[in-house]
Image (cartoon, rainbow, N blue to C red):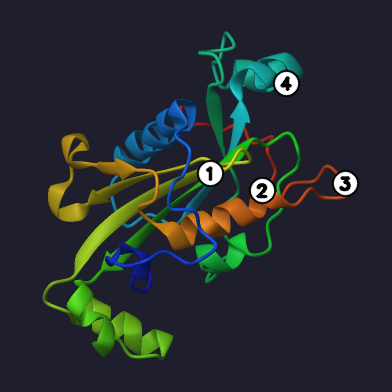
Amino acid sequence: MNPPFEDQHEGLPPADVPTDLPADPALASAVLEIESHVGREGWDQPARLYALVETAALVEQEPALAAMMEIDGPGDEGSFTPIEQDGLPPGQQLEEALESIVWPPSVAGCAAVVERLVLPPDADAQIPEDPAEAEKFAREHPQRQEVRIVAGATRAGAAYCALRLRAHDDEQSVVDGTDLVPGLLHLLHATLEQVPLADEPGGSTDESEGTE
């Protein structure tokens, strides 16, 4: 399990993260699809990263990949297809990896999945500064909660999140919304703000594994 995820505490998001994020039903659908897919595989999973590609463009430009993913049509207007990327190198945190990723123009958005320990807001002042000590503190805190976070962002500026507590492990208890984890959303948006000189993603988008 990774260190405590502080964005889950009540408080103000970073100044450069918009609090009034545009709604995008296609992004919400993709995030919830990923959450449901990952949820069926249980807990204690490594972090995951997905490219979000417009389904119509995928079918037109990559028909072989679309067929491999059993996509036989453009889908709903504006819909996204999540394409899972290679796993993170051993020992690398998701937040660290996101700082070095720049997606190619063909990627309309991205999504990340990560499990975190969440502590109550009144525990903030007690969390040690040392990362190892902070993780130990979180693991031993009597009010800790384990949560799976799925967060997605698009080049258009939209964002969506889905959270599932291990203590309430069912789809009916998933909490979703546009700005639940502002720090992680900020990192995801940053990967989409720059265009690489060559059409090479931070992670390949020709993976055959989707969420279908």
In the image, residue 62 above or below residue 124: above
Foreground: disc 2 or disc 3: 2
Compare marks 1 and 2 and give the one earlier in the sequence: 1
In the image, residue 129 above or below residue 172: below
Compare marks 2 and 3 and give the one earlier in the sequence: 2
Compare marks 1 and 3 and give the one earlier in the sequence: 1
Q: Name the residue under label 4.
A: 62
What separation in Å lies between label 1 and label 4 (alpha carbons)? Answer: 22 Å
Per the image, label 1 sits on a secondary structure element best described as strand
The reply to whether residue 5 is in sight is: no
- The label number, if any, that marks residue 198 in the structure image: 3
What separation in Å lies between label 1 and label 2 (alpha carbons)? Answer: 8 Å
State left or right for residue 140 relative to residue 104: left
In the image, residue 109 above or below residue 115: above
Residues 135 and 179: in front is 179
Residue placed at 57% from the left, 9% from the top? 72
Q: What residue type is labelled 4?
A: Glu
Q: Which amino acid does label 3 sit on?
A: Ala
Residue placed at 19% from the left, 81% from the top? 140
Foreground: disc 4 or disc 3: 3
Q: Which amino acid does label 2 sit on?
A: Leu
